[in-house]
Structures are given as structure tokens and as C-alpha cells.
């Protein structure tokens, strides 16, 4: 049951970065990796804070996380920020849930000190898209979407690759 919760959370919260590019004029693309360490392990970055069930269902569970964002998939690649948020298990059939994540960039070039806020549905399998609903600092008024997919997982951690596409209000 804990593995199912952690894998759902891992899929729901994936990000870490390295590349910045302008895809179209005004469209910004960020690429990075999200590194999560499962609850119950040393230095865990995700924890289940509410579980309403005595059975194997995860419906209604709440997980919070504070995951490293890195420039690459390697756990020793450059730390660029943190992904902080929560995941709500909102599907009765356990096929997905809701995530709210703030991506805080500490060492990411011109975006250092800025944040992006995201919200949306995450599925338990396959790639996911969620909305970018705002930002702060150099990313103020950001609007767009992010795509994420699980890159790798072990018994104790996951790595998710993120691609964010957005514009800024002028």
C-alpha cells in the first residue's frame, strides 16, 4: 500500500531542470528533473499525511512533498530548486488524482528566485499534463502547461522528467 501511494505521488510530482529555450516567440520552455525519496526511508521527501482507509484503497489519501529539482536525471546533478506541494488521491478507481505544486528555482540562471505554480490531474500511468497557473519574480503571470513522465524508479526513489511550456503576460 505504501508503495502504491509513493508511486502515485512520485508520478504526480515530477520535475527537475536544466534547459531553457524559446520554442516560439514568447513561448518559454523549461526542462528539468524531479527527484523524490519515498516515505519511510532516510531523507524522505514525501510523506502520507492522511489516510482514511483500513483497506488497500488510497482514495482520499493526502501526500505532501518537498522534492529536489535537478538539471539532470543523476541524483548528484546540479540542484536547481525544489518542487513543493501535495497530491490528493481523488479517483475512486485509483486511476489518478490532483496535484498542486510550486516549483521554486534557486539556481536556474535568470529564473533564480522565481517560482511557477501548477495544478491539475495526474494519472497513475503514462505521461501527464497539468496547468501552469501562475508564477512569481521573473515568471510572474506565467500561463501554460507542463508535461511530465516517469523516467526511472527504484524501491526507494523516483525520477520524473518535466517539460514546461508557458508565456508571460506583457
Image (tube, helix red, strand yellow):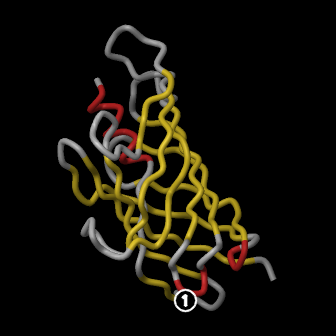
Q: Quadrant of residue 27?
A: bottom right
Residue extending farthest to the left is 154
Q: Position of residue 4 (x, y in %)?
A: 30, 31
Image quadrant containing the N terminus: top left
For residue 106, above or below residue 67: below
The answer to whether 38 appears left or right of 66 in the picture is left
Q: Residues within 10 Å of mark 1 (few under 14, many from 20)?
A: few
Depth check, front residue: 4 or 129: 4
Label 1 element class: strand
Residue wearing tag 1? 22
Identify the residue at horizontal 54%, vertical 39% (top origin).
Answer: 98
Q: Residue 90's x, y, as percent?
A: 52, 29
Above or below for 161 versus 37: below
The residue lying furthest to the top in this view is: 54
Number of on-image labels: 1
Q: Residue visible at 46% across and 45% down?
A: 122
Q: Position of residue 73 (x, y in %)?
A: 28, 69
Q: Residue at x 68, y 68 (%)?
A: 143
Quarter of the view holding residue 86: top right
Quadrant that contains the C terminus = bottom right
Q: Residue furthest right?
A: 170
Asked if 135 appears above or below 152 in the picture, the reply is: below
In this picture, residue 120 sits left or right of residue 73: right
Query: Which residue corresponds to the image point at 62% horizontal and 65% vertical from the top-left?
Result: 116
Depth check, front residue: 160 or 145: 160
Question: Height in image: 98 above or below 36?
Answer: above
Residue 141, given in percent of the width and then of the height, sits at: 76, 70
Amino acid at each position: 500500500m505504501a508503495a502504491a501511494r509513493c508511486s502515485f505521488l512520485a508520478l504526480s510530482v515530477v520535475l527537475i531542470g536544466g534547459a531553457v529555450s524559446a520554442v516560439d516567440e514568447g513561448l518559454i520552455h523549461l526542462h528539468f528533473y524531479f527527484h523524490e525519496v519515498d516515505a519511510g526511508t532516510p531523507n524522505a521527501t514525501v510523506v502520507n499525511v492522511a489516510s482514511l482507509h483500513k483497506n488497500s484503497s488510497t482514495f482520499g489519501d493526502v501526500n505532501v512533498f518537498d522534492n529536489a529539482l535537478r538539471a539532470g536525471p543523476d541524483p548528484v546533478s546540479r540542484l536547481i530548486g525544489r518542487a513543493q506541494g501535495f497530491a490528493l488521491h481523488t479517483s475512486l478507481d485509483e486511476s489518478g488524482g490532483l496535484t498542486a505544486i510550486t516549483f521554486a528555482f534557486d539556481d536556474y540562471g535568470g529564473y533564480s528566485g522565481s517560482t511557477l505554480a501548477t495544478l491539475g490531474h495526474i494519472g497513475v500511468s503514462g505521461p501527464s499534463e497539468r496547468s501552469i497557473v501562475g508564477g512569481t519574480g521573473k515568471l510572474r503571470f506565467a500561463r501554460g502547461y507542463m508535461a511530465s513522465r516517469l523516467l526511472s524508479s527504484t524501491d526507494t526513489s523516483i525520477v520524473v522528467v518535466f517539460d514546461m511550456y508557458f508565456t508571460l503576460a506583457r
